[in-house]
Image (cartoon, rainbow, N blue to C red):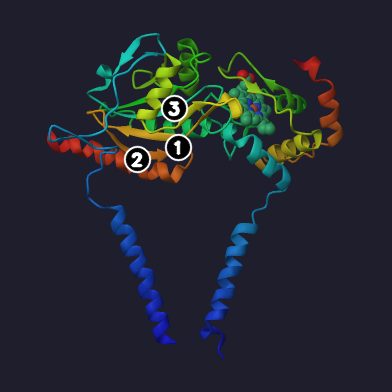
Amino acid sequence: MNMIQNPKAYCLVFLFLVYCLTSCSDVKYSQGEALYLANCSSCHMPEAGGVAKLYPALNDLRNSDVKLDALPCIIRYGQNKDIYSLEMEGLKNLSSIEINNIINYLLNDINGIELEYSIDRTKGNLQNCKDTD
Amino acid sequence: MMQIRIIGIIAVIGFFVVACESKSSDKPLPIIGRLEIVDGDTIHHTIPDFEFINQDSQLVTNQELTEYIYISDFFFTSCPSICPIVKKQMLRIYDKYKSNSMVKLVSHTIDPKRDTADKLKRYAADLGVDTGKWVFLTGDKESLLDIADAYFVAAYEDPDAPGGFDHSGKIILVDTKRQVRSFAEGTDPEDVDRFLKDIDKLLHEYDSKS
């Protein structure tokens, strides 16, 4: 049977396109993405754009005051800066590896900062949290 | 073969025609809630009298709202779950009707212990909104939880829920007669798209009268 007239062929092409659209997104740190969506996106929004000044945006870390070495501590122990009316509580249930995944997702996939934040860096920073705040 | 294809095409077109038609219907918005018949008159559900305190510690009652249609929601500032997402949608609504003097927004906290007037004032400032247009209410906890019920919003204290309260992220549209006319699921931007059309439709009711 001629390919063009075969509805099965259309079906296959269609399924292939759907498959592409859903799977061809090029997130580098997909575990970090899943963890971000589950733990952070409700406040910082799925695309990390935040909500006004209430929930700070995390998609412009290059131009923010947040230091990269402070990220693990903020995630585990939260933050309460005077410039924000709300407080962020720490997410104590996340392991250092999960925190590391989230940071890499934020830096590489959200902010386009090509930097592999090592697990040692995350662990080291977590050990020094008390000093930074 | 050919027939099947034609039937398929007709089915697809038919689907769109039906779908579009039901969306752009010109029926007025319903009045939501139970009807009561009192002395032969039908009485619609209305938002009961209330007295709350706004972000400037001023008393606010229904009286201040009778000339407006308003969009209402329930939240608390320390809410870790759905509130920020709902607020983002409320902000969309605010932005769309910023210059329409007929429209107000009314957010109620359900955690008055932590959400004092001062706290709400800072919250509104961080949200960057004009509190003349978008008021934030606090007050007696029982009254706040009770009024949620009148807006058909489930809200209650629950130590096991994130942040200590369980509540739905509904956004509610109320007309000048205190009647509930539409809802949106505040966590679903597409549902809010539809809701914005409902607000336009309600505003239209007032255009045609004046």
Mark found first going from the N terminus, 3 or 2: 3
Whether residues under marks 3 and 2 lie with C-beta atoms below 8 angstroms apart, the answer is no
Q: Which chain carries label 3?
A: B
Q: What element carries label 2?
A: helix
Q: Is residue B115 above or below residue A60?
A: above
Badges 1 and 3, same chain = yes
Residue occupying image coordinates x 34% and y 22%: B133
Which residue position holds label 3? B74
Q: Distance between the residues labelled 3 and 2?
A: 18 Å
Which residue position holds label 1? B186
Q: Which chain carries label 1?
A: B
Answer few, some or many: residues within 10 Å of disc 3's Cα (few below 14, many 20 plus, some between 14 and 19): many
Whether residues under marks 1 and 2 lie with C-beta atoms below 8 angstroms apart, the answer is no
Q: Quadrant of the C terminus of chain A?
A: top right
Q: Distance between the residues labelled 1 and 2?
A: 12 Å
Residue occupying image coordinates x 24% and y 36%: B203
Give the amino acid type for the residue marked by disc 3 in the picture.
Phe
Give the amino acid type for the residue marked by disc 1 in the picture.
Gly
Q: In this view, does B138 lie above or below A57?
A: above
Q: Is residue B114 rendered to the left or right of residue B64?
A: right
In the picture as drawn, the residue positioned furthest to the front comes out as B39
Frontmost of labels 3 and 2 is 3
Tell me which corner region of the image, top left, top right, bottom left or bottom right, holds residue B71.
top left
Residue occupying image coordinates x 33% and y 68%: B14
Q: Is residue B205 rendered to the left or right of residue B17?
A: left
In the picture as drawn, the residue positioned furthest to the bottom comes out as A1
Mark found first going from the N terminus, 1 or 3: 3
Q: Is residue A133 rendered to the left or right of residue B155?
A: right
Answer few, some or many: residues within 10 Å of disc 2's Cα (few below 14, many 20 plus, some between 14 and 19): some
Which residue position holds label 2? B196
